[in-house]
Amino acid sequence: MQEFVQPSQSTTTNCTREQYDADYARSIAEPDAFWLEQAQRLDWITPPTKGGEWSYDPVEIRWFADGTLNLCHNAVDRHLANKADKTALIFEPDDPDGKVRKLTYAELHGEVVRMANALKAMGVTKGARVTLYMPMVVEGVVAMLACARLGAIHSVVFGGFSPEALAGRIIDCESEFVITADEGRRGTKPIPLKANVDAAVDEHETPVKGVLVIAHTGADIAMKDGRDHWYADLASDEDCPCEPMAAEDPLFILYTSGSTGKPKGVLHTTGGYGVWTACTFHYVFDYQPADVFWCSADIGWITGHSYVTYGPLLNGATQVIFEGVPNYPDHGRFWQVIAKHKVSIFYTAPTAIRAMMREGDGFVTSHDRSSLRLLGSVGEPINPEAWRWYRDVPGEGRCPVVDTWWQTETGGIMLTTLPAAHAMKPGCAGLPFFGVQPQLVDNEGGVLDGVAEGNLCLIASWPGQARTLYGDHERFVQTYFSTYKGKYFTSDGCQRDENGYYRITGRVDDVINVSGHRMGTAEVESALVLHPRVAEAAVVAFPHDIKGQGIYCYVTLNAGEDGSDDLAAELRQQVRKEIGPVATPDRIHFTDGLPKTRSGKIMRRILRKIAENDYGSLGDTSTLADPSLVDRLIEGRVDG
Ligand code: PRX
């Protein structure tokens, strides 16, 4: 096991080791009392008297069920009393010479009201699903909050998904409204957001009746009469009160990939999610009122929901919203932004850290990082080498690093160290947050105690837990609660060491974590087999220096067809069209067959080992229908 690293800078702290020990024990022994107390971080219209009411068999989860509140009020309006002039958002555009836009809480309130009025004018009401397909701009956050204000359910679709993927998500949650921008821009590259919305809505049977378009780049785009509206034409400053919501009313749907079938619409509700994001933000980032926080995630992912839109604003924090990419105009862009806006807490993904590490320290050290006091990592396992570099070079050896493990389904951070309370271990997420009860089990469900490696389950509910999959509770039950009855199964492998620290080893299902983004192998396979020359496809992960994992595709072609570089390029294009650039295959391996058992089941274990270049441990191949295929697959392995 790795060494302990003591936090070398003693921060003003929201939690000492003694407090953590006492509060953690209490959060387990008296969860309702503990969480009803934490719920007071929010303003309630009707304060809740009930804590958790949940069961994992049958699956039914409620928190604070008799409380009512509005999260937009909590993120914006309530700060007007004493933080009206405090900066809420600092927008840093893609172009480093572009215009920085700062909004106080009072100005943010004005924007949210204008957006909410525009949505109302389109016909958005409480409970309506509203799809957002947006660049990383102020209006993205504003649109999420405006939905929350009206009680509408937002479903944000990452701008890197294709029109096909967007259409699938619109149709699945029967969303009648879309909010988008003319174009996005990342590293000077324009992203045709409105054109993609047109393709999604015009080429599919969707229920969309209103599209709200934000003028961002000023690009010339087509507007469809009666359906498309410029934001500026519908926005108005009229009074627009916050809709009172029951704690268990839905707040948002966020689609994420699973090991089978189409993406799942993970549903989060208002009260529990609000309490979880507000509370984790306060403790994990040891948030102090003078901090400038920056989470580099896009609002299209859960990290952007919980630690861009909700967590920081519920705490009345000042934060940076960044439109660009880490390598434009050069590899020092993140550190330049940190110096420019005096960021004190920075939260990013291991992929970005590894990519920057490769470019050399000069891109970091040429920028002033004296404002930084805390660094965070999220989204995928961070290798100890990258962890140490992050801490020593950007963090100058004085900033604690929190390696936070969580998932779309958990709503917020679950395993982490707390900056001043716990020593850190490079590569280890750390300890359970308040109320989190991890358990490691073997493949048969046997509970593993002490130092162990196994499948990570959570055996008690927490307020931020997803409640269901939109429109498919049975799939929710099957996916998360059926492998180990009575437990939430995370699908992650995990080790626990002698200090009780948890280290996530990665997914144990057919989900690939590419640059911290979840990709279902089944989705990529479905996209590949749509090509008329493809007979069959099997997709697995392989270790990738920068992305963590890459996408390796085994493809068999129809009789008489031969593989070629051109066809590989076509297949890549096919996947980009069906899912989006985020899912672009790294390697395409044409083969004359896939290893199957005599009953026809593809032996993915073998395909994974070959993709990983690990032939020593292929295991038993004697049950294969065609054992000689393995040698041909090894010979044909695609490298680079
Ligand atoms: O495998 C784990 C990995 O990311 C998965 C969840 O992905 P998603 O729902 O997209 O949420 C990502 C942002 C929270 C997990 O099942 N993961 C996330 N954080 C870590 C991690 N793996 C190791 N260490 C982490 N800190």
Image (cartoon, rainbow, N blue to C red):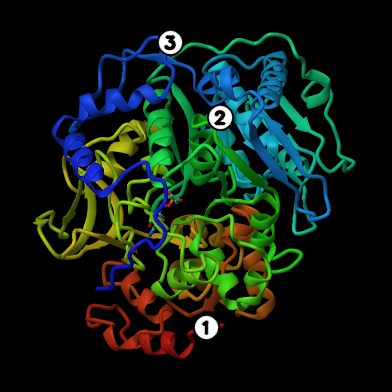
Disc assigned to residue 638: 1
Q: Position of residue 590 (x, y in %)?
A: 53, 78
The amino acid pointed to by label 2 is: His
SS of the residue at dot 3? Answer: loop
Of badges 2 and 1, the one in the foreground is 2
The reply to whether the C-beta atoms of the residues labelled 2 and 1 are less than 8 Å apart is no
Q: Residue at x 68, y 58 (%)?
A: 325
For label 3, the crowd category at 10 Å Cα-Cα, with few meaning under 14, some 14 to 19 and many 20 or more, is: few
Precedes in sequence: disc 1 or disc 3: 3
Check disc 2 and report the residue beneath it: 154
Relative depth, front residue between 604 and 55: 55
Of badges 1 and 3, the one in the foreground is 3
The amino acid pointed to by label 3 is: Ile
For the C terminus, the image quarter is bottom right
Of badges 2 and 3, the one in the foreground is 3
Precedes in sequence: disc 2 or disc 1: 2
